[in-house]
Each structure stands twice: as C-alpha cells, then as structure tokens.
C-alpha cells in the first residue's frame, strides 16, 4: 500500500471515530432515567439543485439526541435542542468521498409531535474536495439546513430538508453545494 492510499484511509476513518465518540457521549444522561423520544435515527438521500458544475448526490445515516435543556413546551407546541451526527457518501462526477458532520439543531414539534420543523448547522468533514470540474475548496465545510418531517406511523417519520454546504471562506474556492434531501427516521 502506498503512502497516498494510507493517508486517504486516515482521512476517511478519523471523522467516523469522532462521530462514534459523540454518539457515546450523548447516550449518557437522560437515557439512564428511562425517558423516551430522546433519540432519532434514520437515513437521508439528497440531490444537488443544478447550480454547480457537476451533479451531486449524497446518502447518509444519522442519529440525533435531544439535549436536556429547558425549553418552551405545551399541548400543541414543544421545542427541543438537538445534537446530531451523520456519516455518508458524497458523489459527483464519478468521484465518491466520505462526508461526516456533528452539530446542534433546533426542533419545533407541532400538533402533538405530528409535524416537526428543524433547523441547524454542523461543522462538516469531506474526504474529497474535488469532483470533476467542481472544487469545493478543502476538507473542512459547514452544513446548514432547514426542513420538516411528518409522523407517518407511531415513531416513523418522513421528511424533507434543504441544506447548504460551504467552507465559509476558509479556502480560496468556495462554490457551496445546495442539496434537496428526503429522510426517513424513527424516534425512540
């Protein structure tokens, strides 16, 4: 194995280790108290909006943990602060790379948790920053999103989110990447 391949493996594995560590830390606290609806897990599939030089797609799995912070709550409206971690594959121009993110979000539940509005921002790591003619600038990015999900059966939900990933000017190139994303999730 050459040095370049070994370096690529390390760049791919490090974010995964960070995501697993964050999930472990989040699992402490309220889980011991036996509370429910603290976790949300699921999968997402997204496609670019066509403004970039290349067409992109992203597939990922995610876990979100409700944090024990006091917030507004009532019969028809409740809100929560979440910490979310995701890991997946970003593809474009026959190039594939790891994408991983960990960051905070805000969830607002309406009508007895039937509708959930979400927004957040996450520092993001990508293992590839060049996809054909598209140069995303570098491996450190930031992903912001807004979206909604609807409970379709007990704890299962179907959702949509619009997300924007860019490097916030850390590098010379900063084209940004917008994705339309559908998600399936379960809360427990």
Image (cartoon, rainbow, N blue to C red):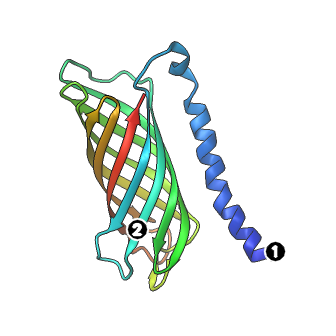
Q: CA distance from mark 2 to mark 1?
A: 29 Å
Q: Residue furthest front?
A: 153
Question: Residue 1 got which mark?
Answer: 1
Q: Is residue 9 above or below residue 19?
A: below
Q: Residue at x 40, y 72 (%)?
A: 56
Question: Residue 57 got which mark?
Answer: 2
Ranked by sequence position, the earlier of labels 2 and 1 is: 1
Q: Is residue 63 above or below residue 162?
A: above
Disc 2 is placed on an element classified as strand
Q: Residue at x 29, y 29 (%)?
A: 79
- Do tag 2 and tag 1 residues touch (Cβ < 8 Å)? no
Instruction: Answer with left or right where residue 15 lies relative to residue 30.
Output: right
Instruction: Answer with left or right where residue 63 lies relative to residue 111.
Output: right
Q: Residue furthest right?
A: 1
Q: Position of residue 89 (x, y in %)?
A: 51, 62
Kindly indicate the quadrant of the structure image that contains residue 1: bottom right
Q: Is residue 98 visible?
A: yes
Q: Residue at x 45, y 28 (%)?
A: 67
Q: Position of residue 105 (x, y in %)?
A: 38, 41
Kindly indicate the quadrant of the structure image that contains residue 21: top right
Q: Position of residue 167 (x, y in %)?
A: 45, 65
Q: Is residue 178 above or below residue 144?
A: below
Question: Residue 76 got which mark?
Answer: none
Q: Residue furthest bottom?
A: 133
Q: Residue at x 51, y 13 (%)?
A: 33
Q: Position of residue 28 (x, y in %)?
A: 58, 25
Q: Is residue 138 visible?
A: no
């Amino acid at each position: 194995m050459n040095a370049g391949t070994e370096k690529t493996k390390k760049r791919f594995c490090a974010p995964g280790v960070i995501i697993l560590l964050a999930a472990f830390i989040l699992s402490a606290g309220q889980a011991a108290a036996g509370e429910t609806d603290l976790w949300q897990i699921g999968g997402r599939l997204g496609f670019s909006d066509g403004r970039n030089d290349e067409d992109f797609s992203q597939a990922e799995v995610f876990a979100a943990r409700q944090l024990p912070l006091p917030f507004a709550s009532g019969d028809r409206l409740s809100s929560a602060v979440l910490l979310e971690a995701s890991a997946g594959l970003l593809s474009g121009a026959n190039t594939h790379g790891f994408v991983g993110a960990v960051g905070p979000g805000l969830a607002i539940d309406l009508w007895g948790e039937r509708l959930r509005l979400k927004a957040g921002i996450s520092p993001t790591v990508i293992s590839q920053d060049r996809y054909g003619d598209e140069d995303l600038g570098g491996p450190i990015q930031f992903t912001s999103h807004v979206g909604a999900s609807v409970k379709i059966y007990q704890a299962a939900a179907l959702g949509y989110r619009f997300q924007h990933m860019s490097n916030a000017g850390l590098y010379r190139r900063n084209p940004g990447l917008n994705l339309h994303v559908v998600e399936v999730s379960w809360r427990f």
